[in-house]
Amino acid sequence: MKKNQIDFITMGCSKNLVDSEVLMKQFEDNGYKCTHDSKNPQGEIVVINTCGFIADAKEESINTILEFAQAKENGKIRKLFVMGCLSQRYKKELEEEIPQVDKYYGKFDFKQLLADLGKAETVNSGCQNPQNIIGRHLTTPHHYAYIKISEGCDRHCAYCAIPLMTGHHVSRPQDEILEEVRNLVDSGVKEFQIIAQELTYYGIDIDGKRHIAELVARMADIKGVKWIRLHYAYPTDFPFELLDVIREKPNVCKYLDIALQHISDKVLYAMRRNITKEETYRLIERIRERVPGIHIRTTLMVGYPNESEEDFEELMAFTKWARFERMGAFAYSEEEGTYSADNFEDNVSDEVKCSRLDKLMALQQDISAEIAAAKVGKEFQVVIDRKEGDYYVGRTEYSSPEVDPEVLIPVAGRRLRTGSFYEVRITGAEEFDLYGEVI
């Protein structure tokens, strides 16, 4: 093991990744070397940032903890710490079940690890709010970064355990966010993924008003910001002024990640989504009307308690109508402590859930293939993320890193630089990826 090296393992979403990056920078300021998601961790200390969203994510986090607990027992590492959503929610149980971990931290006290190791928290000079450190060790490619604009969620969807782990919605001050963006631009970042549990709620806790449109517009005016992409909007009471910003600001990508979950009025009511089928249809129409060419990413759920075959067919019909450019889906998983778990029986069989999920994803696969094929012959601006085998791998403004289709450009042509933008003509399409040539 390497002395003064800390290996960070991050599970789950990009919001967790930002927390890991903040803590890594703090340790580096205190003389440690930090690695992230190394295939062969060699540090004397390992920090695991866990996810506790759904059953599969919890299982993956627990298995990772057990793996490194065994490594500690075998003398391969000296210290093991666990932080994040899973330990926020199940700290007591984890302490009892996996005592090999030196200490568990939650979502909000993880910086205490610095003090526990005898280190001091450092603050960037010029940071307007010392309680919110904006110094980060970026683990993403140098040209893009995630910006977390708030923490927590005040929505109370019946199935969701996120508020149990993250607490109430708390918006970061605008000036602090903008300062972080400027600092990242100065370090070479060009593309920003704006993330939150519920970004359209931004500002409500500050003065009772939604300020997401204002924030994104101000961000877009910062020199050097090439692309801004928005993740995790909520459909109820959607702030339509945000669409004007997406349409009018050329560096705000025509892309919106908005989880809809279902379309049946019966299911939406049981989910406590506070929106109807008719309102959802109208929302999609308005988004597409206000921002021509926008690519919508959504998430849908099958197998919610009491979901009938008729409810599922409504969901299939909605998906056919909406023709989402990007769509993910998952089967309902009962989470203890949620309204659903306390009030409904998980009465849709696993077999039916899997069947419905397969049908929905097969439908979306056909839609995605048609949308991709329609891009052949057209020209798009593409950012290059990496070189992989015989191809440069990039993305258009309509694709977020790691989750969306990529553009493959043969290496045999001109030499391309990672993080640079090129005009590319699409020459071919598969279900999820495009092929192109630089013009």
Image: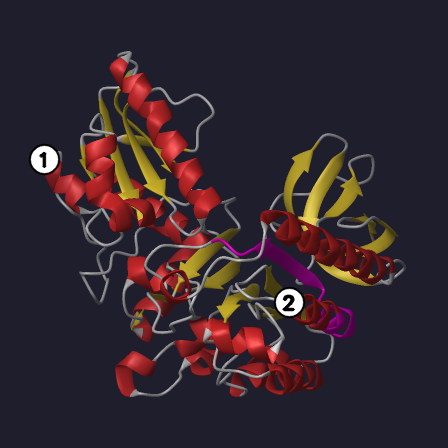
Q: Quadrant of residue 20?
A: top left
Q: Mark 2 or mark 1: name the one nearer the start of the chain.
A: 1
Residue 319 on the magenta span: yes
Residue at image mark 2: 308
Q: Quadrant of residue 276?
A: bottom right
* Residue 118: assigned label: 1
Q: In terms of secondary structure, where does tag 2 sit?
A: loop
Rendering coords of residue 402 (x, y %): 59, 47
Amino acid on which the number 2 mark rests in the picture: Ser
Q: In terms of secondary structure, where does tag 1 sit?
A: loop
- Outermost residue on the top side: it is 74
Q: Is residue 108 above or below residue 113?
A: below
Amino acid on which the number 1 mark rests in the picture: Gly
Rendering coords of residue 2 (x, y %): 29, 17
Q: Is residue 12 above or below residue 125?
A: above
* For residue 71, side relative to residue 416 (left or right): left
Q: Is residue 225 visible?
A: yes
Give the crowd class for mark 2: few <14, some 14-19, many >=20 residues within 10 Å: some
